[in-house]
Amino acid sequence: MRILMLSWEYPPKNVGGLARHVEDLAISLAAARHEVHVLTIGQSGGASERRENGVIVHRVEPYPIHTPDFITWVLQLNARFIEQAVIIMRKYGPFHIIHAHDWLAAVTARALKHAYRLPLVATIHATEAGRNSGLYNEMQRYINSVEWWLTYESWKVIVCSQHMRQEVQGLFQLPPDKINIIPNGVYTKKFRVTSVDPQVRKCFATSHEKIIFFVGRLVVEKGVQVLLEAMPEILEKCPEAKLVIAGKGPMEGQLKNRAGELGIGHKVCFAGYIDDHTRNQLYRAASVAVFPSLYEPFGIVALEAMAAGTPVVASETGGLAEIITHGIDGMRVFPGNVGSLADNILAVLHDESLAKKLRANAGKLVREEYDWTKIARKTSELYQEVYNQYRRTSWPARPSIIDRLRQFAPLVEEHFDRPDTPLSGRYDLARRRAALVNQSRGREEINQE
């Protein structure tokens, strides 16, 4: 099949887990002999097209126009996407499926669907209401409406967990058979590290310290603030512990200040953004990886830690609760509960036999359940199902030019000598438009009465 994916982030642009998901899915589908195109944002220098790991990646630079807010920027990005998509369609089409990832590509997805009459599949990775525990301002309500619009326009909607299925169905009132659960995955070979480079470790902790590792965006829903609050208790019972926080986000300054207030600044390392090599080295060096999320649709970072052989402690929320079996392949804690988080981290730090069991079972889990080859096969089966239904479904015919003309300027004399003769009769455009206005006003007056 020929597939066009739309995603506002794709490596090397990584904002969250979406970029890694789209890249791994695209590569896996290409390995299964599908022709996969990804349209995404690029750097300065105009549009570019390059084959990467079997995937044809089209990168475009947004218009160099100042935007007053994020919503305006997204709309301008979609205008640029549509412009490039027309070129892609002309050069590589016809395509079989359009696959949009999250609301930021909704405008492009909908435009291509109707312009080229192609089936649309959407993956909802997270929702605005879920991220914010509700909708509190106009921007959030706008994003929520675009998310609903994307799911409405889609033939099928993919979510990554049962938790997200319930969330999307509840928010957008989708029919159950429109939603499909296909989990995220992980390439275990990407995270295999045989030994730790002492020079890398030395940048973050001394040789005798036990590393507690967090990687992710520094935002409220990731729960890093809860981990900081748990550190005094952890250090009291395990003085050799050292917390390494990798990632950037709007909470970074606040978290650094809080670490100073708690008197643990010397035991917390804010590593900022790290590359994949450093991340894998830290996974290997860490005694435990911690993900104390308050909201987590899936939790791909937990799978990465498992694939790297690092014991995982994570919140019992969202998709994380579906991945981890407590005490078997990871430890689950109550979301936002400082005591629960500290106790479970200490259990892993102090009990090497428990840590060893978690590593072994987690490695088996990711190999058997979250392998990208299996996930790509499920996705391609869904594509085929959608395409088969699409071929059996008649798309409503576009109105002819004559029908469109009649809407605004129908003939005063609506007759034809023969069906194949040119249009005859006289147009009275001004009178027709006046009649439409009067008709509309008359309906409004009746409704008011």
Image (cartoon, rainbow, N blue to C red):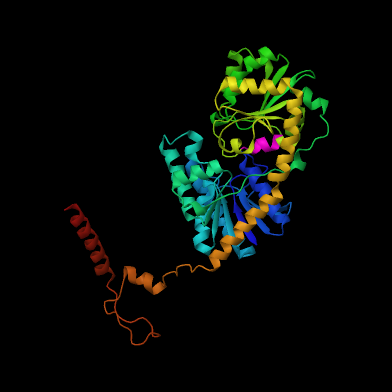
- In the rendering, at what x and y percent does residue 117 appear? 52, 64
Residue found farthest to the bottom: 417
Q: Is residue 327 shown to the viewer in this render?
A: yes
Query: Looking at this view, is 407 or 28 the one in front?
Result: 28
Name above or below for residue 397 compared with residue 213. below
Q: Is residue 301 magenta?
A: yes
- In the rendering, at what x and y percent does residue 390 appear? 54, 65
Q: Is residue 69 shown to the viewer in this render?
A: no
Identify the residue at horizontal 67%, vertical 52% (top origin).
376
- In the image, the segment drawn in magenta is 299-305
- In the rendering, at what x and y percent does residue 307 appear? 73, 38
Query: Looking at this view, is 442 or 124 the one in front?
Result: 124
Total numbered badges shown on the rendered structure? 0
- Give the quarter of the image for residue 291: top right
Q: Is residue 129 magenta?
A: no
Magenta stretch prevailing secondary structure: helix
- In the rendering, at what x and y percent does residue 139 appear? 44, 39
Tell me if 162 is positioned left or right of 421 in this view. Answer: right
Tell me if 309 is positioned left or right of 121 in this view. Answer: right
Tell me if 273 is positioned left or right of 295 in this view. Answer: right
Query: Looking at this view, is 412 or 205 the one in front?
Result: 205
Identify the residue at horizontal 73%, vertical 26% (top origin).
354
Tell me if 441 is positioned left or right of 217 in this view. Answer: left
Residue found farthest to the left: 449
Question: Looking at the figure, which quarter contains the N terminus?
Answer: bottom right
Identify the residue at horizontal 46%, vertical 48% (top origin).
148
Identify the residue at horizontal 54%, vertical 49% (top origin).
105
